[in-house]
Image (spheres, rainbow, N blue to C red):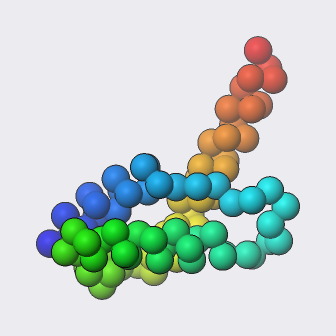
Amino acid sequence: MSKRAVQFLEEWVSENMVKPVAGAPEGDDSEARLRAEECVIAAKEEGIAKEDIEEEVGDLVDYMSAAIEKAVNADVDRAVMKDRS
């Protein structure tokens, strides 16, 4: 089940991740919490329990926070590269 849970999570994140609102206070994890809740709902529809996901990746809110940060950093890197062109 764990491989299925991780595969579901990775696909869900790639299809549904939304970056945080610009100007959100440092340490504000409301976007990550919202994404985690939405992911859990979708996972349940697929017969995957939150516990199965968290068994593999740890706390889901922390995972979503890291995914959001990664997406933001990728946007920054793209902007920097564009500016250099």
Image location of residue 70, percent across then percent down: 59, 53
Instruction: Give the percent coordinates (x, y) of residue 84.
Output: 79, 20
Question: Residue at coordinates 38% horizontally, 76% vertically from top-left?
Answer: 40
Taking depth in this image into account, of 84 and 7 the one nearest to the observer is: 7
On the rendered structure, is 3 left or right of 32? left
Instruction: Pick out the residue farthest to the bottom.
Output: 51
| Relative vertical location of residue 68 with respect to residue 56 in this rendering, above or below | above
Quadrant of the drawing holding the N terminus:
bottom left
Q: Is any part of residue 42 visible from this angle?
A: yes
The number of discs equals 0
**Residue 57 occupies quadrant:** bottom left
Instruction: Find residue 68 and report its image quarter.
Output: bottom right
Q: Which image quadrant is residue 39 in?
A: bottom left
> In the displayed structure, does residue 32 sit left or right of residue 25?
left
Does residue 62 show up? no
User: Residue 43 appears at what percent x and percent y?
Assistant: 30, 71
Q: Residue at x 69, y 60 (%)?
A: 20
> Residue at 42% of width from left, 49% of height from top?
15
Residue in the foreground of this view, choosing between 45 and 66: 45
Residue occupying image coordinates x 52% and y 69%? 35
